[in-house]
């Protein structure tokens, strides 16, 4: 979908992008190759050609950093299909709302990695781990996970695009928290953690710290793993349906 996108060009909104698609200008190549393009003067088209050529080169070089802040936040989902094999599904647990981070879960689509406060979670390890990825996906991460990480572990998040699936799902009419969206899409959780929510996750950490019993931490980690693992089918669903909804060729 990213190769079909023109919305990052200056003064291009959804309506103009749709006009381009309808006129047969459906990707970067057709835009560059056509001498005349609807809604573009010759001078403006030359400027756009340079921007698209630069985007084309960076995409071929698999450089996701080029697209960091290039796309509007609401449109970063367009990058998912190209960079999904090097995407990080991320979720954090804290001592309370905007409280200290207790657990950070990372999932690459195949394996999970859990970083726990007092064990293997530190600023250097987190920065090194996140540098492996081309794309970060969260649920409500733009309002919670990423700001909290920046607060307690500054300068660890690389300059790569971020897809907040809460906003992507809302554009498809899927509103509410992650658990609600999962139920709507029949995405299941393990029975042991199916009834655990944010408050219970805080309680599990408190009990682990006060008693030292490993089972509390194990349950918290399992809860966190369900969060990150379930983000992948949610991302697959959101990408497929957003593309079908917005990439319309008449």
Image (tube, helix red, strand yellow):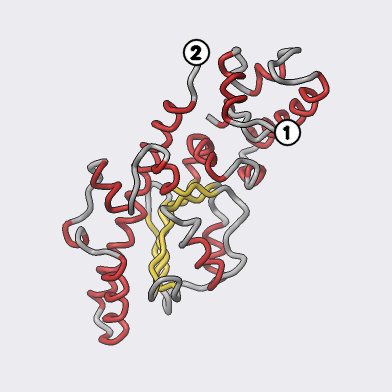
Task: Judge from the rendering whether residue 191 lies leftward or rightward of residue 56; answer left or right.
Answer: left
Determine which quarter of the picture holds residue 190. Answer: bottom left
Element carrying mark 1: helix
Q: Residues within 10 Å of mark 1 (few under 14, many from 20)?
A: few
Q: How many discs appear?
A: 2
- Residue under numbered circle 2: 250
- Residue under numbered circle 1: 54
Element carrying mark 2: loop
Counting residues from the start of the chain, the first of labels 2 and 1 encountered is: 1
Q: Residue at x 57, y 30 (%)?
A: 14
Camera-nearest residue between 161 and 17 = 17
Task: Judge from the rendering whether residue 6 lies leftward or rightward of residue 200; answer left or right.
Answer: right
Camera-nearest residue between 43 and 93 = 43
Camera-nearest residue between 192 and 118 = 192
Q: CA distance from mark 2 to mark 1?
A: 28 Å
How far across and down, in percent of the image, does residue 44 sit? 79, 25
How far across and down, in percent of the image, does residue 25 sit? 62, 16
Which residue appears farthest toward the right when viewing the image?
A: 43
Q: Nearer the viewer, mark 2 or mark 1?
A: 2
Q: Residue at x 46, y 56 (%)?
A: 141
Q: Is residue 159 above or below residue 31?
A: below
How far across and down, in percent of the image, does residue 56 sit? 67, 30
Q: Residues within 10 Å of mark 2 (few under 14, many from 20)?
A: few
């Amino acid at each position: 979908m990213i190769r079909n996108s023109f919305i990052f060009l200056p003064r291009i909104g959804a309506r103009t992008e749709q006009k381009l698609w309808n006129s047969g200008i459906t990707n970067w190549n057709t835009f560059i190759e056509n001498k005349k393009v609807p809604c573009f003067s010759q001078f403006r088209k030359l400027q756009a050609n340079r921007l698209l050529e630069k985007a084309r080169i960076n995409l071929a070089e698999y450089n996701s950093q080029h697209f960091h802040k290039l796309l509007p936040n609401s449109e970063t989902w367009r990058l998912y299909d190209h960079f999904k094999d090097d995407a990080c599904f991320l979720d954090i647990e804290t001592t309370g709302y905007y409280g200290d981070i207790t657990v950070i879960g990372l999932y690459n689509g195949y394996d999970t990695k859990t970083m726990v406060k007092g064990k293997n979670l530190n600023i250097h390890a987190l920065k090194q781990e996140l540098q492996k990825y081309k794309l970060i996906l969260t649920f409500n991460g733009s309002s919670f996970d990423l700001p909290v990480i920046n607060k307690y572990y500054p300068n660890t998040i690389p300059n790569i695009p971020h897809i907040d699936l809460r906003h992507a799902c809302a554009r498809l009419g899927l509103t509410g928290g992650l658990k609600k969206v999962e139920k709507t899409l029949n995405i299941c959780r393990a029975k042991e953690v199916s009834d655990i929510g944010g408050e219970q996750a805080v309680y599990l950490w408190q009990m682990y710290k006060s008693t030292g019993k490993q089972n509390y931490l194990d349950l918290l980690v399992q809860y966190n793993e369900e969060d990150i693992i379930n983000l992948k089918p949610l991302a697959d669903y959101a990408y497929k349906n957003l593309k079908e909804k917005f990439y319309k060729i008449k």
